[in-house]
Image: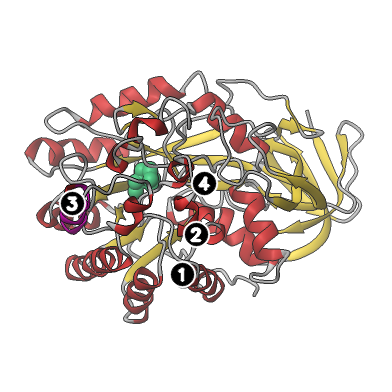
Amino acid sequence: MKKIIKAGTVVTAADTYQADILIEDEKVTKIGANLHDSEAEIIDAKGMYVFPGGVDPHTHMEMPFGGTVSRDDFETGTIAAAYGGTTTLIDFCLTDKGKPLSHAIQKWHKKSADKAVVDYSFHLMISEINDAVLNELPTVIEQEGITSFKVFMAYKNVFQADDETLFRTLITAREHGALVMVHAENGDVVDYLTKKALAAGHTEPIYHALTRPPEAEGEATGRAAKLTALADAQLYVVHVTCKEAVEQIADARRKGFRVWGETCPQYLVLDQSYMEKPDFEGAKYVWSPPLREKPHQEALWNALKSGDLQTIGSDQCSFDFNGQKDLGKDDFTKIPNGGPFVEDRFSVLFSEGVKKGRISLNQFVNLVSTQSAKLFGLFPKKGTIAPGSDADIVIFDPNAERTISAKTHHMAVDYSALEGMKVTGEPVAVLSRGNYVIRDKQFVGKPGDGQYLKRKQFSMNHKAESQTVKM
Ligand SMILES: NC(=O)NCCC(=O)O
Ligand SMILES: [Zn+2]
Ligand SMILES: [Zn+2]
């Protein structure tokens, strides 16, 4: 069925203009004034922004972690994403040492294929480099279209890889045109500080933050950036939380190295003091790296504005407060790390960023959609509104006001980290490849309609930043 989105304000990373959009066969086919087609359904977007669907580069759906499994799966998680204006997400596929990579990838396909309501793809965790892994990687890249590898520099004795593994992954990624992602914290330092805190009898949630200082994140970020330079490779640092890490990324970029950084809405709007809430409520705010003291928020906003950080991920990894977070009631190290944000990523950035004058409208689109599509090999199919692009479109009321609450959100988790927060701006309708997933603020999609996306390789002549972003 053809559709024409009429009279909206179309916003891309590069432009803001008034136009109609014709959608045929899942694609945008025409953009212009006064478009007409007698067969098309007309969608009135007067007074609305028309954004490309959000691309969330960082989610963990139904992920085994911390002795439990993250609460939102590919069904509830992608429905919540759609409500929030996200039409593509890239989830982290966890591998097991000693097992074929294909084993993990098949597991992730099984979890997602019949459940996802919007399109999705996978990053692949690399925990070891050996002949078996090296032999399998060309298939992973060419047949599965997985062109980004994740290495954890933290979570000692669980996911943490050593520097040799990181360095060899970087070299391998360069050879295969893939992008390496790191969780950058010095896991050995964190492990030492954690043991010391526990030995001193400190068990409360706040000690999660106190044992993971910003310096440990800055050190690991700098180390990863330097190894990237040495390997002549390309690096994406996930969930950057602090000034120390931003400085390392900015420094590497100034020197011309191919290093990018992501932050998450939680680090922009919440701070370390939340972890001191009484009655164990601080556990709701346990992420790794942890929430930081308030001044770091300023550094992150400045980095988004200046371009030192380029993307916003949700790091969706939700655990119920009752029955999951409380695994750590007597020991902060047993609190499952992570929180629910896939639904709120887009509107929090609009409300706190654009509405409060911290970033421009076009920077907003770049951060929540375009730049992730470019870096992860999905552009221009995803991440923009242009003839030939998938018709992944958000019709957004910039003046709608609402209060975030677990009572009304669509994630499967029993709390919201943003309970009571007022935001301005809300998706009214969301299209995924031309089909409604959200209509009149209600979900109308279908589990299984989301398609798995094979992604392009990261080329050495990558043009990720060549398109001008309006400031
Ligand atoms: N960030 C977090 O606390 N949980 C999700 C796993 C990760 O990204 O490290
Ligand atoms: Zn992480
Ligand atoms: Zn994560």
User: How much space separates mark 1 and mark 2, taking CA atoms?
Assistant: 9 Å
**Residue nearer the viewer, 26 or 419:** 419
User: Which mark is nearer the camera, 4 or 1?
Assistant: 1
Say what secondary structure mark 2 lies in.
Answer: loop
Q: Are marks 4 and 1 in contact (CB under 8 Å)?
A: no
- Which residue shows up at 32% across the image and 23% down it? 106
The front one of 296 and 357 is 296
Tell me the residue that label 4 is attached to. Answer: 56
Dominant SS type (magenta): helix
Count neighbours of disc 4 (C-alpha within 10 A) and say few if under 14, some if 14 to 19, many if 20 or more: many
Q: Position of residue 126 (x, y in %)?
A: 22, 43
The nearer-to-camera label among 3 and 4 is: 3
Q: Which region shows up in magenta? A: 187-198
Q: Which residue was labeled with disc 1? A: 296
Separation (CA) of disc 2 from disc 4 = 22 Å
Assess whether mark 4 and mark 2 are in contact (beta carbons under 8 angstroms).
Answer: no
Q: Amino acid at mark 1?
A: His
Which residue carries the number 2 mark? Answer: 271
